[in-house]
């Protein structure tokens, strides 16, 4: 059964690397205009097949999301974009939304928060450093794409009452995350398996019948620290604090100097921690969602915060974790 499961994991990333010249890239059905691509990205995000940041561009993770969705739904032509485009047009008729900034969001922004972690450790909360950063993460995108959608707006001076054009996706609401919320084992969710493919930089969730339920882009650990093997999720908690130990992150050896980083979306481990049975290793969020899949962490597995916060709806303590 395990061998079969790993074969399934291999299938969901077959032929969809960024440099791929295979069926997906050459398929004339792959759309070219921004709005159509964004609509497909929003559709895939909604169905838990993460395309990475929403930007209206066909990149590596959008390719993989198309393949994942088609494969998970039993379609043999896994490169078929036309089917997903048709479904997206029905489910996502409106691609953009107008977002009005509410006063409650101001408390989640600290413009003077230092980039340096030692200095930041003196603050009570690892907030967003700008309202633009908050809005970008809230709508599963990055600051650059928000700027593209709002060319005439001064995004450096956003304030409550301002209206910003954003992707029409279900928002990541930082204000709804309960502090220090733990998640217990669940008969159905704990019986699932999450396969972390560190080469393809994807994590896929399967049910107990080996049906793929979701797949998200991830940033794996450095090669020398990747905990290849089979583990279990032992704990899950929101808004964790983080012991920032530079020596441990760089060398894998616990250092004498460390700083306790407070919780918040700009914490190095984001807004949720899923600790594994491998000591010191976890699945977690990130302070830099635009770098998911493109830079390496120490030994853990990073998700964009908007994907990481969905993990408790998919897995729970007891879930098997295969790192390969």
Image (spheres, rainbow, N blue to C red):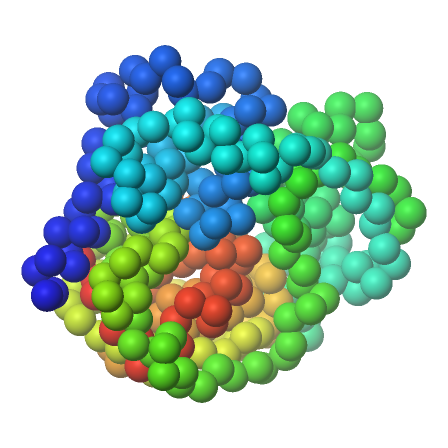
The residue shown at (45%, 52%) is: 48
Front-most of residues 171 and 28: 28
Front-most of residues 183 and 74: 74
Q: From the top left corner, tell me how far across and down residue 196 is, in percent.
A: 27, 58
Horizontal side, residue 94 vs residue 36: left or right: right
Q: From the top left corner, tell me how far across and down residue 183 is, in percent.
A: 48, 82
Among the 4 quarters of the image, the one containing residue 155? top right
Front-most of residues 91 and 151: 91
Q: Is residue 216 visible?
A: yes
Among the 4 quarters of the image, the one containing residue 257? bottom left
The residue shown at (18%, 51%) is: 8
Vertical relation: 308 (above or below) 167: below
Vertical relation: 163 (above or below) 298: above
Q: From the top left corner, tell me how far across and down residue 125 is, in percent.
A: 67, 70
Figure quadrant of the N terminus: bottom left
The residue shown at (64%, 51%) is: 170
Figure quadrant of the C terminus: bottom left
Q: How many badges with numbers are in the image? A: 0
The residue shown at (79%, 59%) is: 105
Most distant residue in the right direction: 161
Q: From the top left corner, tell me how far across and down residue 286 is, in percent.
A: 49, 58
Front-most of residues 318 and 86: 86
């Amino acid at each position: 059964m395990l061998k079969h499961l790993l074969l399934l994991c291999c299938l969901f990333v077959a032929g969809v690397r960024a440099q791929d010249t295979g069926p997906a890239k050459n398929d004339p059905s792959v759309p070219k205009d921004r709005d159509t691509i964004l609509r497909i990205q929003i559709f895939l995000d909604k169905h838990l097949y993460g395309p990475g940041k929403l930007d209206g561009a066909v990149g590596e993770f959008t390719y993989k999301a198309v393949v994942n969705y088609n494969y998970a739904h039993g379609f043999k032509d896994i490169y078929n974009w036309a089917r997903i485009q048709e479904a997206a047009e029905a489910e996502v008729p409106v691609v953009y939304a107008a977002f009005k900034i509410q006063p409650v969001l101001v408390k989640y922004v600290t413009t003077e928060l230092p980039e340096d972690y030692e200095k930041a450790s003196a603050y009570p909360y690892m907030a967003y450093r700008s309202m633009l950063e908050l809005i970008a993460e809230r709508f599963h995108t990055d600051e650059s794409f928000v700027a593209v959608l709002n060319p005439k707006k001064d995004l450096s001076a956003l304030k409550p009452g301002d209206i910003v054009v954003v992707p029409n996706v279900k928002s990541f609401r930082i204000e709804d995350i309960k502090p220090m919320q733990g998640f217990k084992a669940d008969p159905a969710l704990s019986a699932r398996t999450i396969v972390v493919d560190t080469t393809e930089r994807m994590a896929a969730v399967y049910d107990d019948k080996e049906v793929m339920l979701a797949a998200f882009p991830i940033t794996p650990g450095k090669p020398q620290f990747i905990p290849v093997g089979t583990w279990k999720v032992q704990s899950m908690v929101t808004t964790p604090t983080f012991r920032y130990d530079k020596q441990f992150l760089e060398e894998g050896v616990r250092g004498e100097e460390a700083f306790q980083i407070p919780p918040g979306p700009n914490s190095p481990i984001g807004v949720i921690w899923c600790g594994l049975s491998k000591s010191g290793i976890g699945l977690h969020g990130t302070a830099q969602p635009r770098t998911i899949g493109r830079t390496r962490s120490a030994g853990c597995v990073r998700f964009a915060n908007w994907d990481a916060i969905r993990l408790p709806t998919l897995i729970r303590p007891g879930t098997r974790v295969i790192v390969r």
